[in-house]
Image (cartoon, rainbow, N blue to C red):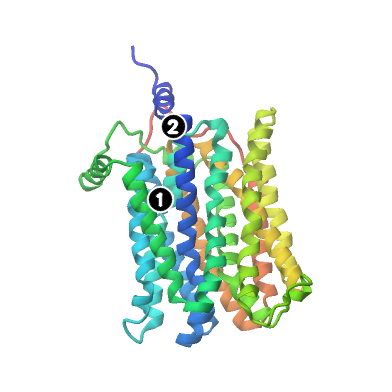
Amino acid sequence: MQPPPDEARRDMAGDTQWSRPECQAWTGTLLLGTCLLYCARSSMPICTVSMSQDFGWNKKEAGIVLSSFFWGYCLTQVVGGHLGDRIGGEKVILLSASAWGSITAVTPLLAHLSSAHLAFMTFSRILMGLLQGVYFPALTSLLSQKVRESERAFTYSIVGAGSQFGTLLTGAVGSLLLEWYGWQSIFYFSGGLTLLWVWYVYRYLLSEKDLILALGVLAQSRPVSRHNRVPWRRLFRKPAVWAAVVSQLSAACSFFILLSWLPTFFEETFPDAKMARCRPWPPLRPNSPLQGWIFNVVPWLVAIPASLFSGFLSDHLINQGYRAITVRKLMQGMGLGLSSVFALCLGHTSSFCESVVFASASIGLQTFNHSGISVNIQDLAPSCAGFLFGVANTAGALAGVVGVCLGGYLMETTGSWTCLFNLVAIISNLGLCTFLVFGQAQRVDLSSTHEDL
């Protein structure tokens, strides 16, 4: 007598979970991969001011370039999650990383192919979005299959901290490269490191046979093993699923707006700020590289321990007996609610030091979303977490397109940064309220009959 499908699926999942050494090796590798993903992604925001000067872009045109990333990003989320569920998220990640690393490294060459700089940079960012869009859905699929449920929040928080590490690395090294060698060097730096990481994963963690098998699956459109079809109709009848989608949309959109516009905010609002106001020694000259280093680095430096702490706190509270949904809502209250308060404060201060503190608090608290909605999606549907995360992140990417463009339009029209931070707060709190009312943590993917995509 064959076991019921749900029990068989759980048994198979248990057999394929990573051992402790494997989990440690892959967690470190994926942390670095996420770091390099954000190195490549944040290269353009760091370079926007310099590129605008070189190519004569105004804020609307810069907003088009910055937001065009999300035009591509929103198109491959569901595909990336579905492929991760089918062939393994690690293979999807490696194949896409090899492509986005190459595109990043050749971006300066694309910028100078012709006088149509805006068109070529927009195309480059769309292509980058297409390639990076598969990463987090594939990652969610991979961790939901390979990591024990009691360790998912902390593992996801560690890997998710790579987004802050990457932005931090680009901000720290990129500010110096920008000052010394020009904006082109930032793209060479981040693209080259990504290709080195791809070589390492291919050489030490994945075999050539695995990749060939995965490519064969993609070419022939057949599963490598028994594949449970996604019960998409069942999923989207559940209010909890829609609450997760809306909350992820809000979290992603708010983060993308800040990621895209914060460097420009500091450059334009405090062009002559003296760091001596923040510390007595050594005094810094106006527009020094260290000034740019501070506002490009400090917020993301704060976000790293915040991300790790949120994952530890989430798993600790659940192990102490608190309900999973109570913990997820607490994390979202910090990640969307409290972070938006500090974002609002950014629009009502004229102090460089206070702005750095508020930006750091807002970005740091947003990392609590890793232990909230990102893990909640795995709570709801671990058998197809990649697909569901892809749907939610597609919504976030679409909102990111609108949010980043709208932010540029509002600032160009009003001449004020306050409207941008008000926009972030409104979006964040809409998502928080939806999740607090409708969010749940019970599985909704269990069904005797699964329907296909």
Q: Quadrant of the N terminus?
A: top left
Could you tell me the amino acid type at mark 1? Val
Residue found farthest to the top: 1
Gap in Å between the C-alphas at discs 2 and 1? 25 Å
Pinpoint residue 64: horizontal percent, then vertical percent. Answer: 47, 75
Sequence order check, earlier mark of 2 and 1: 2
Q: Quadrant of the C terminus?
A: top left
What residue is drawn where x is 73% and y is 74%?
282
Image disc number at residue 78: 1
Instruction: Please give left or right for residue 119 compared with residue 66 in the image.
Output: left
On the question of residue 18 being in view, the answer is yes
Pinpoint residue 47: horizontal percent, then vertical percent. Answer: 50, 75
Could you tell me the amino acid type at mark 2? Trp
Q: Nearer the viewer, residue 339 or 271?
A: 271
Q: Do residues under tags 2 and 1 come within 8 Å of each other at their CB atoms? A: no
Residue behind mark 2: 18
Q: Nearer the viewer, residue 263 or 450?
A: 263
Query: Label 1's element?
Result: helix
